[in-house]
Amino acid sequence: MTIPEKMAAVLLTGHGGLDKLVYDREVLVPRPADGEVLIRVTACGMNNTDVWVRQGAYGTEDDPSAVSTWRRQGNTLTFPRIQGTDTVGHIVGVGAGVDPARIGERVMVDFSIYNRNDDSLADIDYMGHGRDGGYAEYMALPAENAHVVATDLTDVELATFCCAYLTGERMLERARLVAGERVLVTGASGGVGSAIIQLARARGAIPIAVAGPGKEAAMLDIGAEAVVTRGKGDLSEAVHSASRGQPIDVVADLVGGLLFNDLLKILRPEGRYTTAGAIAGPVVQLDLRTMYLKQLELHGSSQGSRADFRRIVGYIESRKIRPLVGGVYPLSEFHRAQTDFMAKNFVGKLVVVPDET
């Protein structure tokens, strides 16, 4: 195929509101550098990180309210930036050192920029932040990050997995969740939460979901053992009832805020708490006595390792996890897509696709 000189993309032009996201049809198509491939993007899933980076909502260690970007290890975000992590597409060009036979492959993108050759995530970054991502018609990326997945899922379905499931898998790895254990999942109807429900089942664990009203049936359908309706009665009592009095071994928390201390109370002694987000508020109060007297473990988690990503690919290929498409939007209607995303009136993932030409 002939690769055009220009493409459509959504540019993040600075921190702020939706007005900082500009749909531009005159963006230069990137050229793959040595060791890279160029893909024609066919779908890209949406994530909370997109919103929080746009808003500059990550604070700093000294000032939680400061406008700041995602990395604590030094900012790599420059403007304009093309966001988008959960990218699926077809290889249409290769840089030096990449086998031209790869042209034509359908690939799912491992969006992580590892910056190291070992398994440490201490200096991790990601495509859509440290370099351009997939909210565009074309994207260049390292060839090693472009993975062929043996599945008959559509491109849109495949674009629901990357970030959410990688994040969820890393959370469960850090918490060492094993078969037979019970995990309480907050924010369970969102992308990461619904991923954790399925990933816990893939490990043989027993997930209990906390979700908003009207989403109970969807949670049961994807594998939740029971559902606690958020905001309905006392959380501890509701979880005790949902678990039939059995202990909660792990809490996978994506909500934070006022729930935090209740979640620590719900955990059994020597239980493990893991978090990768805080949609109800990132600043919490912790009674250290609860933590040390119950001998709890608290784990922060973000993204995942190469091995985590390979497991996700394996789960997809073995059909242990399935996609949850909450809606599909053309790239040119990105403002509407992100507005609907922030409203959270869906289950699973919203996916953006390039406009038909």
Image (tube, rainbow, N blue to C red):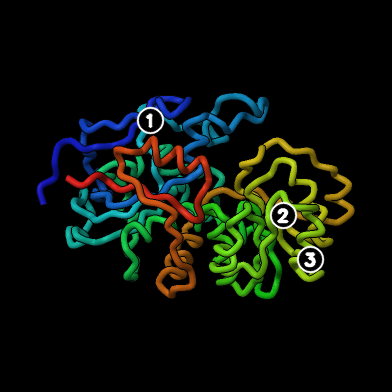
Along the line of sight, which residue is nearer the eye, 154 or 330?
330
What's under tag 1, amino acid-wise? Leu
Left or right: residue 108 versus residue 225 is left
- The residue pinned by badge 1 equals 21
**Residue 134 picture quarter:** top left
What's under tag 2, amino acid-wise? Tyr
Is label 1 in a helix, a strand or a loop? strand
Residue 279, compared with residue 91, is above or below; it is above
Residue 241: image x %, image y %? Answer: 78, 66
Residue 321: image x %, image y %? Answer: 48, 68
* Label 1–label 3 contact, CB within 8 A: no
- The residue pinned by badge 3 equals 241
Left or right: residue 295 versus residue 134 is right
> Foreground mark, 1 or 3?
3
> Foreground mark, 2 or 1?
1
- The residue pinned by badge 2 equals 273
What's under tag 3, amino acid-wise? Ser
Looking at the image, is mark 3 or mark 2 earlier in the sequence?
3
